Image: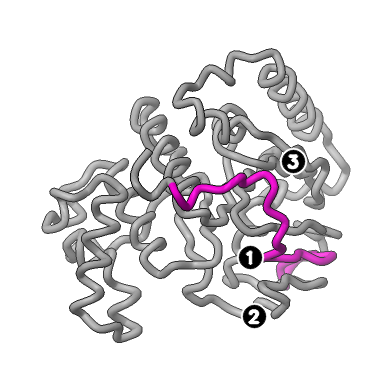
Amino acid sequence: MSAESNIQRDIVEVSNELISVENVGFCYDNSEKNILEGVNFNIYRSEFICVMGASGCGKSTLLKILAGFEQPSEGRVLLDQEEISGIDWHRGVVFQQPPLFEWFSVRKNIAFGPLMRKEPKAELWKKVDYYLEKVGLKDAGDKKIYELSGGMKQRVAIARSLINNPEILLMDEPFGALDALTREQMQNLIRTIWWETGKTIFFITHDVDEALQLGTRVLIMSKNPGRVLEDVPIHFSKEFVEEGTNRARFSEEFYEIRQHILHLISEEAERKPADSVII
């Protein structure tokens, strides 16, 4: 680990509430069918929450509500006891296809948010250099976005979010389109960043192994409408960091939790209510 390891903490024991999701429901104006209904859970500081569920269960809709892109039809979401009413830089978002500015350099893409807030440039460019190094792009700052691979673009997107020092990083299947090797590298990167910075992360994935290797909790969602079906605490990511190996993924406990989650998701995928909704 780097010199920053002195800020590591026992993530599992953190109990400082950051976000409260209270009885949230959502449906579009032209639909009478709820995509989400009665969603309740809390997010605590420095947690790494992975969200899984069958297609159409409302995972991405829930993330959009946390980000402020959508407003719940019922219920509310609180950040530090204040209701979320729109987008702001306190919540960073990383999508599967990062919406970067192709005509800007990597450096200018990362600096975009602080530049819009008119932060002093002398300090800003130092921060840009810091995050370039943190995401492994130290020598790519002057490249244009169209020159980058998919994995490099995601590194830029992560750095662009982190430089704003958000309260929470919201990630919607960020590594889903990457090849297997690049995906593993990006998983290692985001796990290391989470551990060293103590950032809170909300991460949607369809890959149960990815969820178990990254998360401190896995939220399993039902569908039609989407609810939290089960909230599974896990600890393997902490062991990966502390031991420096992925040995935990071959343990009996890992296998049992993996099978349990797959069984829950499979049951939901096969359930076919009369009024099914697919998003």
Q: Earlier in the sequence, mark 3 or mark 2?
A: 2
Looking at the rendered structure, the secondary structure element under dot 2 is loop
Residue shown at the point (82%, 71%) measured from the top left? 75
> Left or right: 202 with respect to 175?
right
Residue under the point 18% across and 78% down: 122
**Residues at marks 2 and 1, CA–CA distance in whole angstroms:** 10 Å
Circle on res. 66: 1
Among numbered discs 2 and 1, the one appearing first in the sequence? 1
Q: Which residues are magenta?
A: 6-31
Q: Secondary structure at mark 1?
A: helix
Establish if 135 lies above or below 71.
above
From this view, report whether residue 198 is shown above or below residue 104. Answer: above
Q: Are marks 2 and 1 in contact (CB under 8 Å)?
A: no
Q: Amino acid at mark 3?
A: Ile
Residue 60 appears in the figure:
yes
Give the camera-side residue of 237 and 89: 237
The picture quadrant where one finds residue 131 is bottom left
Confirm whether residue 95 shows in the render.
no
Q: Residue at x 69, y 13 (%)?
A: 252
| Rendered location of residue 55, percent (x, y) | 66, 41
The residue pinned by badge 3 equals 220
Residue sticking out furthest to the bottom:
118
Q: Are marks 3 and 2 in contact (CB under 8 Å)?
A: no
The percent position of residue 51, horizontal first and vertical second, equals 65, 45
- Residue 180: give x, y in percent of width and height: 39, 26
Q: Which residue is mark 2?
A: 85
Query: Relative to 244, is 251 on the left or the right?
Result: right
Q: CA distance from mark 3 to mark 2?
A: 26 Å
Task: Give amino acid for label 1.
Answer: Leu
